[in-house]
Image (cartoon, grey):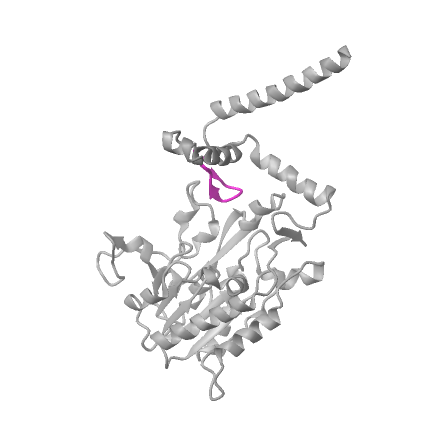
Amino acid sequence: MRENRWRQRITVYSFMGCIVGVAAVLMIAPEKEVSQSERRRLTKQPELTTTTLFNESFMEDLEKYLLDQFPVRDGLRRIKAYFAYNVLGQKENNGIYVVQGQASKLEYPLNEASVKRLANKMQQIKEQYFPQARTCYAIVPDKNYFLAQANGYPSIEYTQMIEVLHQELNNSAQKEDFEYIDLIQGLTIEKYYHTDTHWRQEQILDTAEQIEKAFGIQLDEKTYSRHEISDFYGVYYGQAALPMEPDTIVYLTNHVTDTAYVWNMEENMEKGAVIMPYDERAVLGPVYRLDKLEGELNFDKYDVFLGGAASLQIIQSPASATDKRLIIFRDSYTSSLAPLLLTAYREITLIDLRYINTKLIGNYVDFEDADILFLYNTSIVNNSSMLK
């Protein structure tokens, strides 16, 4: 009996010691502002007031704060991932799986309603802003297209997705309002980053050329200089919580990209008004934003391409071989693609409907005499409700 009592006491004291120890570490250790592995801001210590105490928001926020600031959080997340994979035999962790050194996020099943919603939005935009303009569309497959089925994971029916989109966009028997550019056949898993969702810029030169040819532009071979950014841990690295070798970002420059400049709507707001790119007050930036590699609040090195996600960007390319204009309704994949199109287009406008309402774009974009391209990855097509 006495031995059992001592065991109970040791268990209780050990538990209390752990609580006190964790509390002491939380009090002594500086509060972390960001998690680089998860690529997000961490919850700040909540303020205790009479209102937050009685509406229970303080306790909810405190729980989030303690979870975010817990000592050796990253190590515990990694142990959990190891346990899920190697002990429980799970094939994924947090929806992320790793095969052939490639991390990918599960995306299934096919949401036909979302595909039809996207087609309807594309038709509405065309009818409102450029009913007579030549309009093309292309789909960028996610990494599941190459990995999922071959390794026993569920995935979207990609052929069906494209067929539904094509049928919805071209429901007139007289003509095709939207022309499809098949980029998928030229892509392989090697053209994507291992730890991230995006494609590699240095691997999609042929993709850029294919788009140019679809719009009737054929140029001589382009030459570029390569520049490397090491230790790129993509979006899937932190979510998987498994050890993976970092990627290297390669970005390509030449005299065209060196002389081009980018207008970003978010960086040109003044007292609620938008300063357009032709205004002398406008803030214009380079094609490759090396400043996005500095500071711990810059989570994503992929933002080196055009500065990352933005509602509206206009790229001017004085050294272009033509006077043509291109307007792309885009997602983040276009950030690394657009610089490769600057030799073919004097001006490229990028519109991200995740961040700007469809009804507003006519206030800032001139669609006259421009080539139009809708370019979305399959995750956007399958979740089109995120488009405004």
**As drawn, is 337 to the left or to the right of 188?**
left
User: In the displayed structure, would residue 242 be above or below residue 251?
Assistant: above
Q: Residue 207, percent across and down?
A: 52, 69
Is residue 34 one of those drawn in magenta? yes
> Which residue is rendered at x = 47% and y = 66% of the image?
223
> Which residue is rendered at x = 54% and y = 47% of the image?
233
- The residue furthest front is 54
Q: Residue 286, percent across and down?
A: 36, 56
Q: Which residue occupies the foreground of this view, 274 or 185?
A: 274
**Quick check: can you spot residue 158?**
yes
Q: How many marks?
A: 0
**As drawn, is 13 to the left or to the right of 300?**
right
The magenta segment is 33-44
> Which residue is rendered at x = 54% and y = 31% of the image?
70
**As drawn, is 385 to the left or to the right of 82?**
left
Q: Residue 293, percent across and down?
A: 44, 46
Is residue 161 one of those drawn in magenta? no
